[in-house]
Image (cartoon, rainbow, N blue to C red):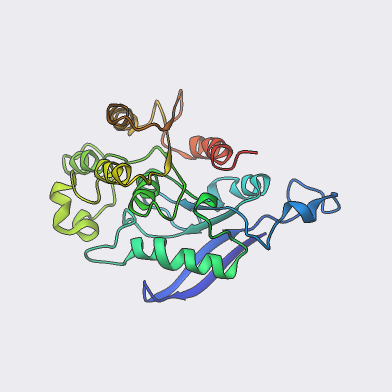
Amino acid sequence: MFMTCHYFSLVLNRNVEINVIVPTPEGNEQITASGKEQRYDYENGLPVVYLLHGAYGDNSSWIRFSSIERYAQAHNCIAVMAGVENSFYQDMEHGSRYFTYMTEELPAYITRIFPASRRREDTCIAGFSMGGYGAWYLALSRPDLYSKAASMSGALDIQKVYEADQAGAIESPFHWKDSFGDAADQLAGSDRDLFTLLQRDREKGLLPELYQSCGDQDFLYTINQDVHRSLQQMGIQTEYHEVPGHMHNWDFWDLDIRRILDWMFPG
């Protein structure tokens, strides 16, 4: 079952649009299949994955460019997609409070309206590019909410991405000061830096499981390699994949989200 929902967000102070997929006896199944009532445990709540878009995207990106409805159906999970502009999922200095929206208001709405589990172990998050950073950033900032976080082609070293943008080495739509304020000049070591958040969560003993992947033809490939090596040096274990021949595009993300869902919701 696929739904586009419109409602008024108190955090963003405007009407918002989200897309939600709820598995039902359809899609890859015959609606007359036996045992379907046992599979869909709406009473106790289904696992949920929040799917984050990248730069230039919105809540429609996953639906338009991937087969996520079929994949969510196969994994018996709810999939939630919201739009945050080009904000890097921040409570923006000059703009909307997307971090608060994503980690507080949206989950509350989903668990009240849909048959979604409230349990941390059933709640996961994944994204690509800007959304790859966003998935780790939200999960590491609120490790009490998410048990697993996956990044595909992620802008994971935010300091290096900022420096590359300022040097003209990459093209981007980001207004760094709007998203990060004065912290944009020194993101390393701040609470927007994933390495800082990782160390903090490890010290607290509450660290989500992390997945990282990137194609070897992706313009963020070197950054992802460096992040993986840094995490190894820190002694942090991740599920890590380098995928030969793939670039920064939907051919890769549509392929890899299947492996991510297998990792998130095994069995």
| Front residue of this view, candidates 143 and 129 | 143
Left or right, 77 with reference to 83: right
The percent coordinates of residue 213 (x first, y second) are 43, 33
Screen quadrant of the C terminus: top right
Horizontal side of 136 relative to 190 (left or right) equals right
- The image shows residue 243, relative to residue 248, as above or below, that is above
| Residue occupying the point 31% across, 31% down | 231
Q: Position of residue 56 (x, y in %)?
A: 38, 52
Furthest residue toward top? 244
Q: Quadrant of residue 218?
A: top left
Occupied quadrant, residue 183: bottom left
Instruction: Identify the residue at horizontal 49%, vertical 35% (top origin).
Output: 252
Residue at left offset 60%, top offset 66%? 114
Q: Is residue 198 above or below residue 45?
A: above
Between 237 and 193, the one lying in front of the other is 237
x, y percent for residue 199: 27, 41
Q: Quadrant of the N terminus?
A: bottom right
Residue 99 image position (x, y, % from top left): 34, 60
Is 174 left, or right, of 61 in this rendering?
Answer: left
Tell me how many marks there are. Answer: 0
